[in-house]
Amino acid sequence: MATLQKIRSKGKILIAVVGLALFAFIAEEFVRSLSYTQSESRQRIGKIYSEKINVQDFNAQVDEYANVIKFTNGLSSLSDEQMSMIRDQVWQTTVNEKLIEHETDKLGLTVTDEELQEIISKGQSPMLSQTPFRTQAGGFDYNALKQFLSQYDEIMTNNEVPVETKEQYNQMFGYWKFVEKSIRKQALIEKYQNLLTNAIMSNPVAAKQNYEGRINESDILMAAIPYSTIKDSEITIEDSELKAKYNELKETFLNIQETRNFKYIDIAVKASKEDIEALDNEMNGYAQALAEGADPAKTIREAASLVSYSSMPISKHALPHDMAEALDSMSEGSQVGPYYHEHDNSVNIVRLISKVSRPDSIEVRQIGVPGATIEEMRKTADSIMVALNGGADFDTIAKKYDQPAAKNWITSAQYEGQTLDENNRMFLETLNTAAVGAYNKIELDNQGILIAQVTDRRNIIDKYNVAAIKRTRDFSKDTYGKAYNDISAFLAGNPTQEEIEANAQQAGYTVQSRENISSSEHYVANVSSTRETMRWLFNDKTKVGDVSPLYECGENDHLLVVILTGINPKGYGTWNQEDVKSRLTSEVMKDKKAALLLEKIKDAKSISDITKIEGAVSDTVKHINFTSPAFISKVGSSEPILAGAVSSAKQGDFKTGIKGNSSVFAFQVLSQNKLSTQYDEEKEKKQSIQTATRFLGSFTSELYKKADITDNRYIFY
């Protein structure tokens, strides 16, 4: 009881303590929730409708597709450029799939497992013929697929199977699962497309109009006065006219994603006069050394040439284009250079040491000689050579030593341009100079002995032992440092957009502009390695008028500073937005010029009346019909409205007052005729349906507009 009384006496304090504890618990949960939300947001690479795309999930798809590319092309790795292309393809594929799924979910369209298996078993997808499971005729082999899938589980659970074999099966299995998923997705898309296509119908009226619009043709005498005959300075345009035109064309100014406008200074750092002189002096020294008989391999290595040296003769196509061209006019022992090649910004020396005739391709079979020591190998090799030269069968001897002895073609392209060690050089040199049918014993330094026979040779060409030095005319560290310090000093003294634009030209810099860059682009100002610049441009904290930091980008040869000049949000552009206003001005300008020219020709009674007007042109145009826009060569423009007007006129009619894309027109119908083709209602209906169906190709664009897509890839790559 005393304890209870003590609790009651402390009641208010306890309530406060419990209240504080409860608040702390709620606050802790709120902070934890906020932290999770922020972390999740940072991992979000995009959004399609309301579905958030996680960067890890996206990267998994990219890795899957990259593995497919490597597997199908026999590659061990992919370049940065290739990976960038793969990310673009995966993103676009993901977007298209989500757009279609959003519609098919509402319609209840699916591809069942049974439907998928039927497509695969019957080989109905073109993707199946691209898999390794093919018949000798090149078609899809379903039985080969089933055999592989049944073997897969056995292989992966068998501890006696080598790791390399398991890895190969695993790669093949991953490739197949990718194909299987792709077939299911493609089948769903085809279902949706078929649904749309089958919803399009024609009728006898449309069929008849389609037929007559095609077979009825007219020849006309045409007169045109181009809008360009009136100077822009003669036209006054009011804001009210721009706003009215904006309302008329508003749908064409819809931005499906946010874009930004910016101005920039891009400095491409180049070699200075001192850098050029230093490289020229260095190259003159190498040229003199080669001319005086210096070891070409040592000289080229010291020169850090971009073209490596091999004493084994090579064909011209293994050399850079400029060096290959130089060889055409050179004799043995002659030398050209140093010379500058502008295309790759390089200084070059070419010395032709010797020229020989060699096969471009050789067919070879070989036996690896067994033996525990090199002495044992030599004895065995000698006995094999005696047997072969005595008429023994090559395949029989190869089989005796468990060798396949298969014939293989070796082409120049397989090894030229590669750095060859002495063993490979000697092996290839021996075979390239060997007679067809002769047996060759080739002892490789510390690697064994081969018995090789050249069974065929093809395409005897000129090959060259050539010493080639190619050096890029690079800038020095001092030159780069000066360029960096100069632009840094300029920006420090001109920190605002207004100051940069006012003083850039005097300082030797050019301010350029770019509009409507989207976050899905890879480069800013066509300069590579500008990811940080892109992040700055699209950062929510970057405001119009802000000047970026100085970025070092490109191949470490560009200095870039950008100024954000405009933000074009997702949705409709405003009438006074720079690019929108420019187009509106052009359209209103055309309308007002057309009005002036139409006033000039309104009282004309014939083509000759119009041709008297300054700037008018005339021509005879034949075979105009309703279904094809008329191309008027005299004004260089396609004019659909003229085709429509001509098709509704009768022979002998004179029509004027036609406002076209490039000019105002008048015409007189000289003759009319019908093509001699028989009317086929069903055929015309099908053509009408096909014409309408072509417009369905843009349905994904319409879906895209509604999907509220966010693309944040620029943050991650």
Image (cartoon, rainbow, N blue to C red):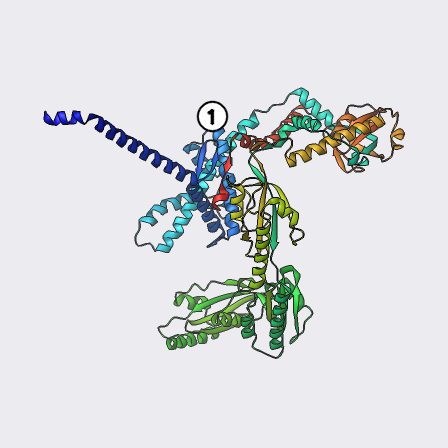
Q: Could you tell me the amino acid type at mark 1?
A: Lys
Q: Residue furthest front?
A: 9
Q: Secondary structure at mark 1?
A: helix
In the foreground, 677 or 78: 78
Query: Where is residue 617 shown, x and y percent of the image?
Result: 84, 35
Q: Is residue 1 visible?
A: yes
Q: Is residue 78 above or below residue 299?
A: above
Residue that numbered label 1 is attached to: 106
Q: Residue furthest left?
A: 1
Image check: 608 left or right of 94? Answer: right
In the foreground, 520 or 214: 520
Image check: 361 left or right of 576? Answer: left
Query: Where is residue 526 shown, x and y percent of the image?
Result: 60, 49
Number of labels in the image equals 1
Q: Quadrant location of the N terminus?
A: top left
Q: Residue furthest bottom?
A: 292
Residue positioned 65% across, 36% down in the render: 578
Mark 1 crowd level (few <14, some 14–19, many ≥20, 10 Å Cα): few
Q: Is residue 677 visible?
A: no
In the foreground, 7 or 69: 7
In the foreground, 309 or 531: 531
Residue positioned 54% across, 43% down in the render: 537
Query: Where is residue 548 shown, x and y percent of the image?
Result: 55, 47
Query: Where is residue 286 shown, x and y percent of the image?
Result: 60, 74
